Amino acid sequence: DSGQRSGDMMLVRLGLACLAFALVTSRTPDEWRDKVIYQVLTDRFAQNPQYADSSSNCDLKSYCGGTWAGLVSRLDYIQGLGVDAIWITPVVENTDGGYHGYWLKDLFNLNSNFGSASDLANMVAEAHKRGIWVMVDVVANHVGPVGSDFTQIAPFNEKSHYHPECEITDWNNQPQVEQCRLSGLPDLDQNNAFVRTTLKTWIGNLTQHFDIDGVRVDTVPEIHPDFWNEFNAAAGTYCLGEVFNGNIDYVAGYQNHMDGIFSYPLFFTMRSVFQNKGTPMSNIEALLGPSGTIWAKFKDPGLLGNFIDNHDNARFLNAQGDVHMYMNALAVTLTTTGIPVIYYGTEQLFHGGDDPEKREKLWPNYS
C-alpha cells in the first residue's frame, strides 16, 4: 500500500544516511553497570542560549522552550552533578502538544521544537567529549491522540497497523493491556509485519546515526514480550524498560526480554518507607538484603534502573517535605545494586505534584 511504500523509502534514506556514521560505538549492558543516569525532559531543562529568556513563564501543559542546543549549554552543570549519562525525551516529531515526546506523529522526522538533526548530533558529540553517555527515550506501543484518523501518522497511516479500538480498563487482563489503548492513544499492532519490521529497523538506525549509547523504552507491558527480544537486539545497545507496576513477580519477568527494567518494586517500597516514616526499614531489607527477593526474582539486578522520582509520579518532596528523609531515599537509590537514575530538579529540591507540576522548567535554577 502507499503507506508501506513511503515508509520503505524513508527507511532507505535513513539507512543510507547511517553509512556516514559507521564508526559508532555501541554500549553493552555490562558497560552501563557503573553509570549514574540523569533524566531530563528536553523541553524543560534548558533553552537555546541564543534565545533564552529565563524570566519567561510557560504553560506546563505545552512547550516551554527547552532544546538540544540548550542542553549543550548546560552540560557543565550536568557534569558538575557527578553523573555520567543523560536520558533525554523522545526525539521524534509529535502531534500538537506533545512536549513530552510520547505522542508520535512522524517516526522519521525529529521534533523541530527541540532543534534540528545537526543540533541533536552536536549535543551527543558534546556530551561524549565530557564522558557523558546519552540514552534516548522511545515509544513503540502507541501514537499521538488522533482518534481513528491514522492518515495523520507516518508511516503508520493504515487501520491495519493498529489493534481494534478498545480502552484498557482492567490492568489484570494482560491481553487487554497489550491490545487496547492507553489513555485513548491508538495502539500499534506489532504482529503486523510492516509495523514490526519498521520499528526494529528504525531503532537500529536511530542509535547508529546519532551514536546513541542506550535506549529507555516506554510502556513495555503494553506489548507482547516476544517483540522486545527482537527490538532490544535491533537497538544494538543497552535497553532499559518501563514496567509501571509494583508487583515484583510481574515486573521481573520482563527482564527475560530486555536488558534492564526500572525497579518499580524498589520505588514503591522506598516511597512507603521514607515518605510514610511508619513503614519499617525491614521492608527494604526484605527486598535488597542478602536473602532479598530482588536476587531471587530478577535475572540480573545489576542492570535494573533504581529511582525515587521521575516524570510519571509526583515528586517525593510533594508528599513528604522532610529533606533528610529524601536524602535517605537518594542514598539507597545511589548505593544499592543497580543503575541509579536521578530526575532533573532533584538537586534543586523540586517538589512538583501531579501532571504537569512534576515537569517544571529548570531555568533559571542552575546554581
Image (cartoon, rainbow, N blue to C red):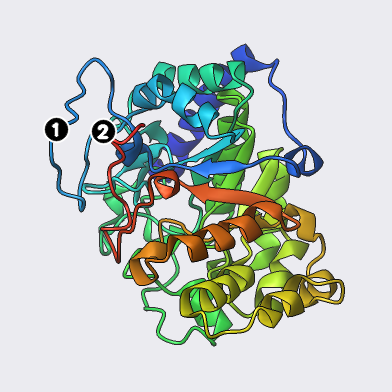
Q: Residue 67 in the image: state x and y as whole percent.
A: 33, 29
- Where 199 sits versus 128, above or below? below
Tag 2 residue: 364
Tell me: 88 left or right of 264: left
Residues under numbered marks 1 and 2 in contact, where contact means CB atoms less than 8 Å apart: yes
Q: Residue at x 77, y 64 (%)?
A: 256
Say the numbered circle drawn on residue 90: none
Of 251 and 334, the residue lying toward us: 334
Q: Where is residue 128, by image quadrant?
A: top right
Tell me: 6 left or right of 289: left
Tag 1 residue: 55
SS state under label 1: loop
- Where 291 sits versus 30, above or below? below
- Residue 191 seen by the camera: no
Of 289 and 129, the residue lying toward us: 289
Q: Residue 321 in the image: state x and y as whole percent.
A: 37, 66
Amino acid type, callout 1: Ser
